[in-house]
Image (tube, helix red, strand yellow):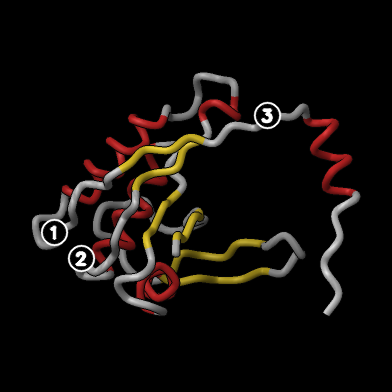
């Protein structure tokens, strides 16, 4: 199983602990996550069977995930770093190897946590124009039951 996600509002200071702050979800509901809850989501629900594939588009996101790794005492398994350089189309975000390198540098900064190097770098790309995406999303339905 792969957890792909961001750590919105989590601290970016080296070694920070505790709350990640409040974020508003897609339904407009405000939620507050903690680093411990991210550890549970990315490892604790099924240890050894979940790979974390964190979104690392910018430097601060690498530090957010490093703090989650530090909170886990080295129990997370990173499958790599996920970037979206190809989909973004600008030079403001990391390319795949840059995201991977930033994540590896950040999690390697704490000598008390031993994590293997993430084995892969990935990059998202959208193959359809925005208008097509909007039409597709408007017509999306959920299965019955």
Q: Which residue is mark 1?
A: 114
Determine the residue positioned at 44% across, 72% down.
41
Pinpoint residue 21: horizontal percent, then vertical percent.
51, 65
The residue to which callout 3 is attached is 127
| Residue on which disc 2 sits | 74
Q: Dot 3: within a 10 Å radius of its alpha carbon, few (fewer than 14), some, or many (20 or more) residues? A: few
Find the residue positioned furthest to the left.
111
Give percent across and percent down for residue 110: 15, 55
Q: Secondary structure at mark 1?
A: loop
Q: Is residue 138 left or right of residue 100?
A: right
Q: Nearer the viewer, mark 3 or mark 1?
A: 3
Q: Nearer the viewer, residue 15 or 69?
A: 69
In depth, the one of 80 and 99 nearer the eye is 80
User: Which numbered circle lies on residue 89?
Assistant: none
Residue at disc 3, secondary structure = loop
In terms of sequence position, does the residue under pointer 3 or pointer 2 come before the other? 2
Q: Are marks 1 and 2 in contact (CB under 8 Å)?
A: yes
What whole-number distance in Å separates the C-alpha atoms at marks 1 and 2?
Answer: 6 Å
Q: Residue at x 31, y 55 (%)?
A: 78
């Amino acid at each position: 199983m792969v957890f792909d996600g961001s750590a919105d509002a989590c601290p970016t200071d080296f070694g920070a602990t505790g709350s990640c702050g409040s974020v508003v979800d897609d339904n407009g509901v405000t939620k507050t996550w903690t680093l411990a809850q991210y550890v549970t989501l990315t490892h604790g629900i099924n240890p050894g069977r979940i790979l974390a594939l964190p979104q690392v588009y910018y430097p601060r996101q690498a530090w957010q995930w490093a703090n989650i790794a530090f909170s886990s005492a080295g129990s997370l398994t990173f499958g790599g770093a996920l970037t979206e350089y190809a989909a973004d189309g600008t030079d403001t975000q990391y390319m795949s190897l840059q995201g991977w390198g930033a994540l590896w540098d950040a999690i390697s900064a704490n000598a008390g946590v031993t994590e293997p190097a993430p084995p892969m770098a990935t990059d998202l790309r959208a193959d359809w124009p925005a208008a097509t995406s909007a039409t597709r999303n408007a017509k999306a339905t959920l299965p019955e039951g």
